Image: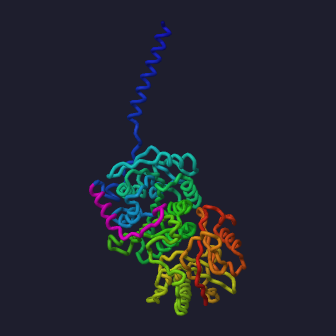
Amino acid sequence: MCRVITGMRKWLLLAFVGVLCVMCARDISPAVREPAVAGQFYPADSRELARMVADHLTKASPLPEIDGRIIALIVPHAGLVYSGPIAAYSYKLLDGSSINKVILCGPSHRYRFDGMSVYGPEIQWRTPLGLVTCNDHLCGALVDKHQGFSVLAAAQEQEHSLEVQLPYLQTVLKDFTIVPITMGAQDEQTIGKLAEGLEALPFDSQTILIAATDWQHYMPASVGSKLDSVGMECIRNLDPDRLEKYLAADKTQACGGGPTVAVIKAAMARGANRALILKYGDSGDITGDKSSVVGYVAAVLYKARDDKGFKATKEPEAASPEKMLLTDADKQELLKIARRTIEAYLKTGATPDFGKVSENIARPGAAFVTLEKQGQLRGCIGQTVATTPLYQTVAYCAIQAAVDDPRFLPVSEAEFKSIHIEISVLTPLQRVRSFDEIKVGRDGLMIFKGSGRGLLLPQVATDYGWDRDKFLRQTCRKAGLPSDAYLSKEAEIYRFQAIIFGE
């Protein structure tokens, strides 16, 4: 009898404990990250904030048609009155989309630490527009499986770079979760760890990467815009390694440069093969004071549809091969522009004003500038996509070939007198469907696989006497890939032609 009573007591005790657990479970809710900069970086009143965001999105036009899958955005993160009109150009592309997982990456401005802080899982972020839930699975995967990631509340106590993105996301998306990542020290090793972590995350068509960064700070607009243009060219050309190098050398400036480099690398690993600068501006556009500004950039990275090839937007089109006509006068003008640009840059660090140029070279164009000394390569840099007028492309690439080709020391002013200049004006890239389409001597090649990319001009195969297979293998090696990577199903190969002329 005593044993029965004891058993009943145990049963009643267990039942009581179970009820308590259920009651406690009902009271448990995710921790809330309260706004740190509401009333400072954006209005604390929900109606005022909603009106501001809606106004920015309405005025963000015109936008290009993105004929492909958007993989990443680059946005600014200052006070919304200043940077919001620029950021809206990126966020408007998501309006009405099915995106439901947003991976946000930004820098830490006020708290120093090493590695990355993932302020989730089981955390909600509040703005005046409501709560945003963290994606527990993805946040947990980063913290549990990748070195350098942790949950660090102190990194978010006063941080604004990710918080100011949420009102736009809450406006253009319906149901979504976030993975909020804040980077501490932005050294090469940490950037690599962030890129590796992002590349390893599950990623589908409803997932997007976002890098939050402002660019040069508190310079005259005429000076700062030149620094910013260097960074934007790296984005346009999907060249995160060069961007990382330029940031380290202070040739361009971005407070969120590390997260931006990592996001570009991860986006390319996810198939991004196209980048567009949607809008550029600075704080002086709002204040009217251009003597000391902060630069803002909105950009999109995406994978163009296969049936449209590499060029898949409504940007001004480069000429097709049969229509790409350059007169002898055009060629001589471009060669003079290249030489004058390098001479001026080596002497003063500035570029000359070329005034009015011919119509042919004022059209958007892609080109490479090659420098040779006594018959030996001395530098070669180019752009593969026609995003700027041809003469500006040549001027920019001429400087880069002279002073920023990582394979060579910068050309000196005295040495430049003995340098020979060659220009290759490229036709639009065409997707290779069959290796039989490639004709050595006519075509140049470009390969994409993961974050690897490499290009060889048509004349390279001719100069070295390569056959088609050797040309493909060498292009892979140029990309830092195994020589047989072109046989992989994940590899994307493009061919192009070039009009080649020199001094």
Image quadrant in which the C terminus is located: bottom right
Q: Is 309 on the left or on the right of 373, as rendered? A: left
Q: Nearer the viewer, residue 303 or 171?
A: 303
Disc tally is 0
Q: Nearer the viewer, residue 262 or 456?
A: 456
Taking the magenta stretch, the answer to whether it contains residue 263 is no
Q: Position of residue 158 (x, y in %)?
A: 41, 53
For residue 414, say whether it is visible.
Answer: no
Q: Quadrant of residue 478?
A: bottom right
Q: Position of residue 374 (x, y in %)?
A: 69, 86
Vertical side of 483 occupied by 421: above or below: below
Vertical side of 26 occupied by 382: above or below: below
Vertical side of 182 occupied by 355: above or below: below
Q: Position of residue 496 (x, y in %)?
A: 58, 77
Q: Is 16 on the left or on the right of 492, as rendered? A: left
The residue segment tinted magenta is: 47-73
Residue at image coords 43%, 22% = 15
Q: Quadrant of residue 78?
A: bottom left
Q: Nearer the viewer, residue 123 or 36?
A: 123
